[in-house]
Image (spheres, rainbow, N blue to C red):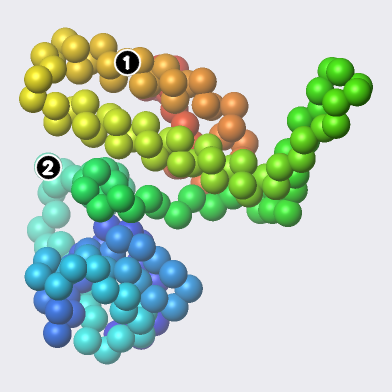
């Protein structure tokens, strides 16, 4: 297969390792989770790798992005993996400067990529918490809904930071975004 560029969640077949799903994308390699062989790093140009194309797709079948979100949720819950979330290009190399009102105190400078990474990690941990709430057997449906609504409001509090993300599909979405 010639230097493929596929996304996370794409199903693949490898002649040696069998079926798998892309869980990470690097410059020249894919991280692929194989059913019987675990996660392997395979070159994008590996001739033993073929994409599994779904046939007879109907409206009842999940879209690839919905499938990717579902798979990423499962991987985060069980594998401790987090997706690579790129910082917007205009922010690269920038600094966050915290200027205190008290002039006798020095300002604090934080590289913006470090600040952004902390925001993304908080988001990832909220997503894991959501998965744990959804799968919790001791909570009633009403309790799960109440906790989910609280987490959605937390996402809404983080929407200020959406300006830092390169890709809009990775933004925080709160209550207002759910109604659109």
Q: Distance between the residues labelled 2 and 1?
A: 27 Å
Residue 165, image quadrant: top right
Q: In the picture shown, does residue 124 fall above or below 21?
A: above
Q: Mark 2 points at which residue?
A: 60
Q: In this view, does 79 lie to the left or right of 122?
A: left
Residue depicted at 16% across the width and 10% down the height: 142
Q: Which residue is drawn at 69% across and 53% down?
A: 92
Residue 4 appears in the rendering: no
Quadrant holding the N terminus: bottom left
Q: Residue 149 carries which label?
A: 1
Quadrant where the image shows the C terminus: top left
Badge 1 crowding class, 10 Å Cα cut-off, few under 14, some 14 to 19, many 20 or more, is some
How crowded is the residue under tag 2: few (<14 C-alpha within 10 Å), some, or many (20+)?
Answer: few
**Among numbered discs 2 and 1, the one appearing first in the sequence:** 2
Q: What element carries label 1?
A: helix
Q: In this view, does 142 lie above or below 152?
A: above
**Is 86 placed left or right of 88 in the picture?**
left
Name the foreground residue: 15 vs 62.
Answer: 15
Residue occupying image coordinates x 85% and y 31% = 106
Helix, strand or loop at mark 2: loop
Check the image and name the residue furthest to the right.
103
User: Does residue 147 appear to the left or right of 90 in the view shown?
Assistant: left
Question: Where is residue 171 shown, x and y percent of the image?
Answer: 48, 36
Note whether 9 is above or below 39 in the view shown. above
């Amino acid at each position: 297969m010639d230097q493929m560029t596929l996304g996370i969640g794409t199903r693949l077949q490898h002649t040696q390792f069998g079926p798998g799903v892309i869980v990470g994308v690097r410059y020249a390699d894919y991280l692929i989770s194989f059913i019987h062989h675990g996660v392997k790093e395979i070159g994008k140009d590996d001739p033993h790798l073929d994409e599994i194309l779904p046939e007879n797709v109907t409206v009842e079948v999940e879209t690839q992005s919905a499938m990717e979100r579902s798979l990423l949720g499962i991987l985060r819950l069980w594998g401790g993996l987090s997706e690579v979330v790129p910082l917007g290009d205009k922010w690269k190399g920038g600094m966050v400067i915290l200027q205190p009102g008290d002039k006798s105190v020095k300002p604090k400078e934080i590289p913006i990529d470090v600040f952004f990474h902390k925001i993304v990690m908080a988001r990832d941990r909220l997503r894991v918490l959501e998965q744990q709430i959804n799968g919790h057997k001791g909570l009633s449906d009403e309790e799960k809904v109440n906790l989910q609504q609280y987490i959605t409001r937390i996402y809404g509090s983080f929407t200020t930071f959406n300006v830092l993300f390169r890709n809009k599909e990775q933004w925080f979405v709160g209550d207002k975004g759910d109604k659109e």
